[in-house]
Amino acid sequence: MQVSLETTSGLERRLTVGIPADVIDGEVKRRLLDAAKNVRINGFRKGKVPMSVVRQRFGEGVRQEVLGDVINRSLNDAFRKENLRPAGRPNVEPKQLAEGKDLEYVATFEVYPAIELKGLEGIEITRLSAEIGESDVDDMIETLRKSQAKWEDVTRAAASGDRVVIDFVGTQGGVAFEGGAATGHTLTLGSNTMIPGFEAGIEGMVAGETRDVAVTFPADYQNEALKGTGANFAVALHGVSAEVLPEINEELFAVFGIRDGDLERFRQEVKVNMENEQIKATKNRLKSAVFDALLSANQCDIPNSLVGEEIEALRSQALQQYGQLSAKLDVKSLLPDELFKAQAERRTALGLLISEVIVKHEIKPEKDRVRGLIESAAATYEDPQGVVSYYYSNQELLAGVEAAAMEEQVMEVLLGTMNVVEKTVPYQELIRPTTAEAV
C-alpha cells in the first residue's frame, strides 16, 4: 500500500492511497471460490458450477464488495500509519477502479486540532446565589396564579393587561405593505410583542370601535424595507377580555399537588421548589462562566465537519416542536444553518477542550457521583428504585449520566485553579434565562 499525505488548509488533510491490483484480484478470486462451493445454478450440481459461470454471474458484485472493504480497511491502516485522528466522515473519491490496474483513491478529511491547554490560575469568576424572602414567595405565587388565569369578556375600554381581538391593516402613503395585515388577531396589551406604540394606541378602545394608530418601525426591524420608517395601522377592535386570577384556596393548592394542606403548607412547598430552582440556576450560571473562561483562554481551530454535525443535532432538536408536521416543512429555509452556527461552534470548541481536560487529568466517572445523579433523577417518580435499576440496565442512559458526572468533575478541576467570588443577587435575576449555554 502506498500512502501520500498533504495538508490542504488548516485542519484539512488529503490522503492519496494506492493498492496493488493483485491484492484486489486475489481477494476477488478467493471470494468467488468460496461462493462456488455453495452457489446453486440451474443445470449444475452444488459445488460443481464452473468458475467461468460463477465469475460471469457474480464477478462484478463481488468486485464492488471487495473494493468497498479494501478502501475502508486501507483507509484505517493509513490513518494509523500517519498517526491521524480524522474528525467527521472522510470524503473518498476513487481515481482508478479498472480491473487489472492498481486501485487509487483520494480521501479528504479534517483532523482534530492539537490543543495545549492553558491554565485558568488566578482568573476571577463569580458564583451567583440568592436569598429567598417572603416577598419572593409572594411573587412566585402570583406567577402561579397567572398560569391558571381565565379570561372573561368585558364591555369597558381596553387597558394594559387586557386581551383584545383585532383586525388591522398597515399602510405607508395609503398603500398596504406585505405582512402588515391580520384578521381576528389576539393580543395582550402591554406584552410588547408588537411594534412600539401599537399596543398603547389600542388602549382606550371599546368593542366595535375603529382607530388609526401611527407607529415608527425600529431601526433594527427585521424587514429591511421598513426599518426606521413610519406607518399607519387601521385597527378594528372586536372584543376585550380581562384576566381573572383564581383565589388562593384549596382548589389552587390542589392544582399544584397540595391536596391536604393550608396556605402555610402551600407557601412551604413553593419555597422548596424555588430553592431547588436556585440551586440549579447557580450551578448553570457558574458552569457557563467557567466554560466561558476556558474558551477565552484556549482559542483553537475547530473542524467544520464537527460544527456541521452539531448544527444538524440542534436543528433536529428544534424540529421536535413541529411534531409530524416537520416532515412537510422546508427545513433548511425554516431553520437555516446560520440560526445554529454560533451555538454549534461554541459546543464543538467546548467539547474539544473538555475532552482535553479529561485526558490531561485522567478523569473517569466516579461511581458514587453517577449513582447520586441517577437517584436524584429517579426521586421524582413513584418507584425510584425501579427507575434506578432501569438506568443501570440501559447503556445509553447510563453513558449520558456518566458524561454528566465527568462534566461535573471537569468543573471541579477548573474551579480548583480559579479565584471564586461569591455574590448574592435577587432571585428573579438569578433564574432569568441567559443566552449563553454551558455545553
Image (tube, rainbow, N blue to C red):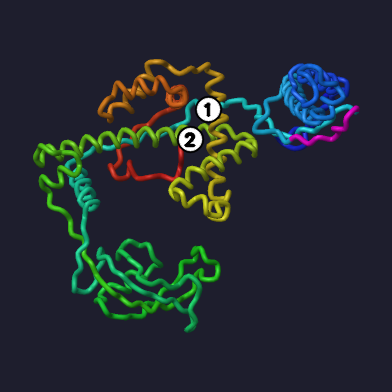
Q: Nearer the viewer, residue 31 or 126?
A: 31
Look at 85% across and 32% down and name the residue there. 97
Q: Which residue is mark 2?
A: 439
Where's the N terminus, which quadrant?
A: top right
- The answer to if 427 sits in the magenta stretch is no
Q: Secondary structure at mark 2?
A: loop
Calculate the distance from the C-alpha at mark 1 to the C-alpha at mark 2.
10 Å
State if disc 2 and disc 1 touch (CB < 8 Å): yes
Q: Nearer the viewer, residue 164 or 436?
A: 164
> Vertical placement of 263 versus 213: above or below?
above
Q: What is the x, y in percent for residue 86?
A: 68, 29
Q: Quadrant of residue 201?
A: bottom left
Look at 33% across and 80% down and name the residue there. 211
Look at 43% across and 26% down and name the residue there. 397
Q: What is the x, y in percent for residue 151?
A: 22, 61
Q: Which residue is mark 1?
A: 354
Q: Secondary structure at mark 1?
A: helix
Q: Nearer the viewer, residue 333 or 410?
A: 333
**Side (left or right) of 241 relative to 351:** left
Residue lying furthest bottom in this view?
174
Tell me the magenta residue range.
92-100
> Vertical placement of 187 versus 110: above or below?
below
Three-letter code, disc 1: Ile
Q: Nearer the viewer, residue 181 or 138?
A: 181
Pointer 2 local density, CA inside 10 Å: few below 14, some 14–19, many at least 20: some
Look at 25% across and 65% down and name the residue there. 162
Q: Quadrant of residue 128?
A: top left
Q: Quadrant of residue 356?
A: top right
Q: Earlier in the sequence, mark 1 or mark 2?
A: 1
**Side (left or right) of 405 relative to 50:** left
- The answer to if 98 sits in the magenta stretch is yes
